[in-house]
């Protein structure tokens, strides 16, 4: 039973090791794509808002240039905050990916190391039993 479980675990770990680089690349590309789409949507919204402001009120737009500059600064701040948030999300996603990737590997290695430890302890116990049997046989012969 242990041998079958160990074989299944080994196959799972090898499969995970083979597929993990592809999964990591796919998740990075997907994250960058989502960031690009968000940036494009923000840019389109900003262009739409600025075009609506200038087409409906050209006189107000010329007199209120300070308001448009403040709205541009506000948009830039929001964009920077969203980029920082995206970077933080990317870092969190990378940490979670490594956790998901490394947890089964460490569990598998732990099982293998513990199994080897049990084999070592059984061999050591068997040597001690053989030594005690030899001592006992020598004690009987004397």
Image: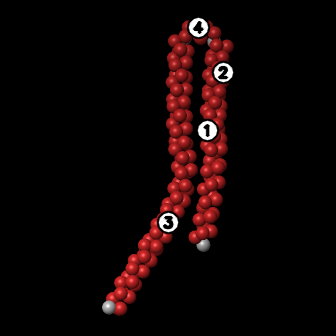
Mark 4 or mark 3: name the one nearer the start of the chain.
4
- Judge by depth and name the residue closer to the eye, 101 or 75: 101
Mark 4 or mark 1: name the one nearer the start of the chain.
1
Residue position marked by numbered label 3 in the rendering: 116
Foreground mark, 4 or 3, reads 3
Q: Is residue 75 left or right of residue 40?
A: left
Q: Residue at x 63, y 40 (%)?
A: 25
**Which quadrant holds residue 4?**
bottom right
Q: Circles 3 and 1: CB distance less than 8 Å?
A: no
Q: Residue at x 64, y 13 (%)?
A: 54
- Judge by depth and name the residue closer to the eye, 29 or 108: 108
Residue position marked by numbered label 2 in the rendering: 48
Which secondary structure lies at badge 2? helix
Residue position marked by numbered label 4 in the rendering: 62
Foreground mark, 2 or 3, reads 3
Label 1: few (<14), some (14–19) or many (≥20) C-alpha neighbours in 10 Å: some
Residue position marked by numbered label 1 in the rendering: 28
């Amino acid at each position: 039973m242990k041998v079958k479980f160990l074989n299944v675990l080994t196959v799972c770990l090898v499969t995970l090791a083979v597929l993990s680089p592809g999964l990591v690349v796919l998740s990075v590309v997907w994250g960058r794509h989502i960031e690009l789409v968000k940036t494009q949507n923000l840019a389109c919204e900003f262009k739409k808002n600025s075009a609506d402001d200038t087409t409906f009120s050209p006189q107000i737009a010329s007199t209120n240039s300070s308001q448009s500059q403040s709205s541009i600064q506000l948009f830039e701040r929001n964009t920077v905050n969203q980029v920082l948030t995206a970077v933080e999300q990317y870092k969190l996603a990378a940490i979670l990916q490594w956790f998901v990737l490394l947890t089964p590997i460490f569990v598998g290695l732990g099982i293998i190391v513990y199994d080897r430890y049990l084999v070592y302890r059984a061999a050591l116990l068997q040597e001690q039993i053989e030594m005690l049997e030899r001592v006992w046989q020598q004690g009987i012969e004397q």
